[in-house]
Image (cartoon, rainbow, N blue to C red):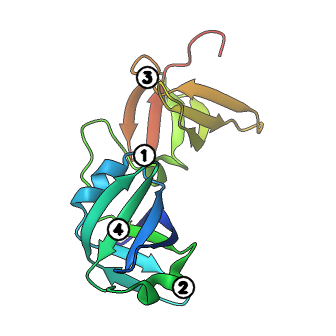
Amino acid sequence: MADELFRVGVITEPHGIKGEVKVYPTSDDPSRLKRVKEIILDTGKEKITLHPTSVKFFKQFLIFGFEEFTSRNDVEGLRKKELFVTRKNAVKLHKDEYYISDLIGLKVIEEDESEVGTLTDIIETGANDVYEITRSDDTKLLLPAIKQCILEVNIEEGYVKVYVMPGL
């Protein structure tokens, strides 16, 4: 788990003639990528560590320059290749922030320790995330990720303690 990879973007095309690439960000906060020192490129055959030299914002894209690439020819074959960061190099989270990959699969319990189900998906909405919980009978419960509903997250012990509001 220590060297788990988080996808942060997908290369869409070369940009200019100096080896820059246009990247569609898959991170929830693309501005964090300005501070990343190493990015891993998955070519499909191998994973290569790259060192960003520049990051610019262009519409909904990022334009990355890397130490390792100096011409358009260097990056021409990288369309649709994915970019990752390691857990160690990922931007540090604030209090009460979690990596989605750490939450998926956690047991969901109520305050009285009764089991609700398993956290199977996180739906990102504009206002707040919504946790999708699959119950033992395979029905789904959608629970807003707000303080009133999510009482405790304990990744080490593998559970999320929740309050299920009446009517949900």
The alpha-carbon separation of the residues under discs 3 and 4 comes to 35 Å
The alpha-carbon separation of the residues under discs 2 and 3 comes to 43 Å
Judging depth in this view, the residue of 113 and 42 nearest the camera is 42
Judging depth in this view, the residue of 23 and 94 nearest the camera is 23
The residue under label 4 is: 64
Q: Which of disc 3 and disc 1 is earlier in sequence?
A: 1
Crowd rating for badge 3 (residues with CA inside 10 Å; few <14, some 14–19, many 20+) = some
For the residues bearing labels 4 and 1, Cβ distance under 8 angstroms: no
Q: Which of disc 3 and disc 2 is earlier in sequence?
A: 2
| Camera-side mark, 4 or 1 | 4
Disc 2 residue type?
Gly
Identity of the residue furthest to the front in this view: 17
The residue under label 2 is: 77
| Camera-side mark, 3 or 4 | 4
Quadrant (top left/top right/bottom left/bottom right) for the N terminus: bottom left
Question: Which disc is residue 28 wearing?
Answer: 1
Tally the marks.
4
Q: Which of disc 4 and disc 2 is earlier in sequence?
A: 4
Disc 4 residue type?
Phe
